[in-house]
Amino acid sequence: MDPDRAVELIQSAASGAAAWRLINLKLATRFKALFAWLCALAATNLAAALLSRFQGAYFWLYIVYVSLTCVFGAFAVGEVFSLVFTDYPGIRSVGRWSTYAGTALATIASILIAAYFRRTSTEGSVHLFYLEVGQRSIVFSLAVVIATILFFLSRYPLNLGWNTYVASGLFSVLFLSDAIRLLLDSLQSQLHNDVIDWAESAFIVICLLAWAMLLRPYSPPPPSRATPPSAHDEHLLAQLAAINQMLGRTARR
């Protein structure tokens, strides 16, 4: 078995294990978009491992793989945003829809700009070219949202459940690693590097297995903190409440 097939099989198994763990702990309905993203990752990687790279079906599978992972990835990032700010409906609503709208606009703009500079070139597959441009635009746009989520998680004392922290943290790191891979690949002459791709796949497998092992049966977060928040934490929470109130008024207009 060649290394590419082995990597795809391992990644499919790790994705399936994380998805099965969500089902086993009755968390699939709580993390619907993340569950759908894991299933898409498992199914497409398994199909890629079974197909020959020289078959025409492999090309179309790649089209389906990129499309599904981008769409479900966008919804998964939106879901993570909603889970992190579940107690702040103003931030949750505006942030989620801004994520979708910003990603769509950035993707359309990138494709239009790429089309303008490509109009005199006939090299390579046109469909694949625009797919790659769209994928990079979506991933980098969502990476900005992920960085924002990680900033809030590191700065503000949010009262979240264990599984939300695990899902948010590991999915964020996993998604950012894919963005770094795409950036490094884009610097290569062939827009592809096996060593970079294999290293990133190994990192994805580690994240997925850690995700599966760290999940716990669902229990709602405690309604109040065991110890009173410090003056600094109270200031940060008041700041967050003010942002939520301002964005809530904006969303109602």
Image: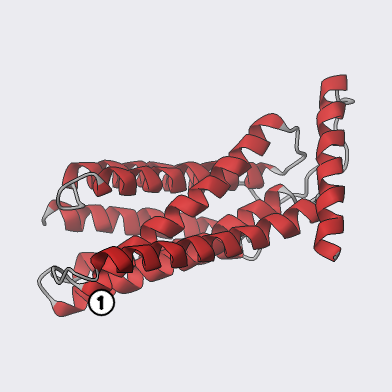
Residue lying at 88% horizontally and 38% vertically, measured from the top left: 224
- Percent across and percent down for residue 219 are 74, 49
Q: Could you tell me how many numbered marks the image carries?
A: 1
Query: At 64% from the left edge and 31% from the top edge, which residue is drawn?
Result: 154
At label 1, which amino acid type do we have? Trp
The part of the image, by quadrant, that contains residue 100 is bottom right
Give the answer, above or below, for where 241 lies relative to 121.
above
| Image side of residue 81 versus residue 18, left or right | right
Q: Is residue 69 left or right of residue 132?
A: right
Q: Residue furthest top?
A: 231
Q: Is residue 129 left or right of residue 149?
A: left
Q: Answer whether residue 163 is visible to the viewer in this image.
A: yes
Where's residue 91, x and y in %? Answer: 76, 51
Residue sitting at x 49%, y 53%: 141
Residue beneath disc 1: 60
Q: Secondary structure at mark 1?
A: helix
Quarter of the rendering occupied by the C terminus: bottom right
Task: Work out whether 193 lies above or below 35.
Answer: above
Percent x, y for residue 19? 49, 60
